[in-house]
Image: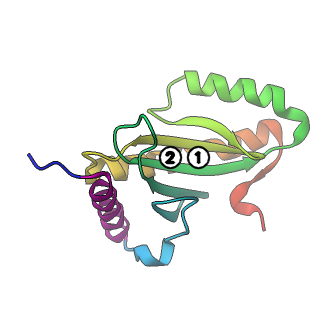
Amino acid sequence: MEILTDTDELARAAARVEDMIRAQGIDPEAVRMEPPGQGYAWSLLRGSAAVAVFLRPARDGEEGPRLRVVSPIVKCDEGVRPELYKTLLELNASGLGGMSFGLHQDRVVVVAERRAVDLDDDAVRYLIDRVGVVADHYDDQLIARFGGVRVSDLP
């Protein structure tokens, strides 16, 4: 069994992500973004939801690089936060298939993360598609209940 360095694992995982993007008929270079640190990043659309895919090196205490898929879905009104937080926690506890809701800045996000070691094509496709499906499903529901605007509709 070949032992790969974190750099090798990160490059191997990036190739898998780009293969999946190509299989969708999209040029990976056209959707590549600047990552927020070291690693790789791409931005895709799934329904009405933008989905960002990040690959980053391992941090202290982690076993290898990480794949993180994030979809910012709703910018909510300030006055609804306590009830919104409660609802997001309840949705997280209801079982979202490895996804969870969170907040980043002033936006509700759907996020999934896993280690990139032993990453295969099915796992990449599943995470990206599943985050997109959950985001696309809940964005309108959250807006109907709490107000706000879909992130994809922001200028």
In front: 123, or 35?
35
For disc 1, the marked residue is: 135
140 sits to left or right of 22: right
Q: Which of 6 and 33 is in front in this view?
A: 6
In the image, farthest residue toward the front: 60
Left of 107 or right of it: where is 14? left
Residue 45, picture quadrant: bottom right
In the displayed orientation, state which residue is furthest to the right. Answer: 79
Q: Is mark 1 on a helix, strand or loop?
A: helix
Q: Give the range drawn in magenta.
A: 5-24
- Residue depicted at 78% across the width and 68% down the height: 155
Horizontal and vertical percent position of residue 83:
80, 26
In the rendered image, the residue lying farthest to the left is 1
Is 54 within the magenta?
A: no
Which residue is at the front of the view, 62 or 121?
62
Residue type at mark 1: give it.
Answer: Ala
The residue carrying mark 2 is: 131
Residue 2 marker: none
Q: In this view, does 135 lie above or below 81?
A: below
The answer to whether the residues at label 2 and label 1 have Cβ atoms under 8 Å apart is: yes
Q: Residue at x 54, y 56 (%)?
A: 51
Say what secondary structure mark 2 lies in. Answer: helix
Q: Position of residue 150 (x, y in %)?
A: 73, 54
Mark 1, other Cα within 10 Å: few <14 / some 14–19 / many ≥20: many
Report the amino acid beneath label 2: Val
Residue 10, image x, y percentages: 34, 56
Q: Position of residue 5 (x, y in %)?
A: 26, 52
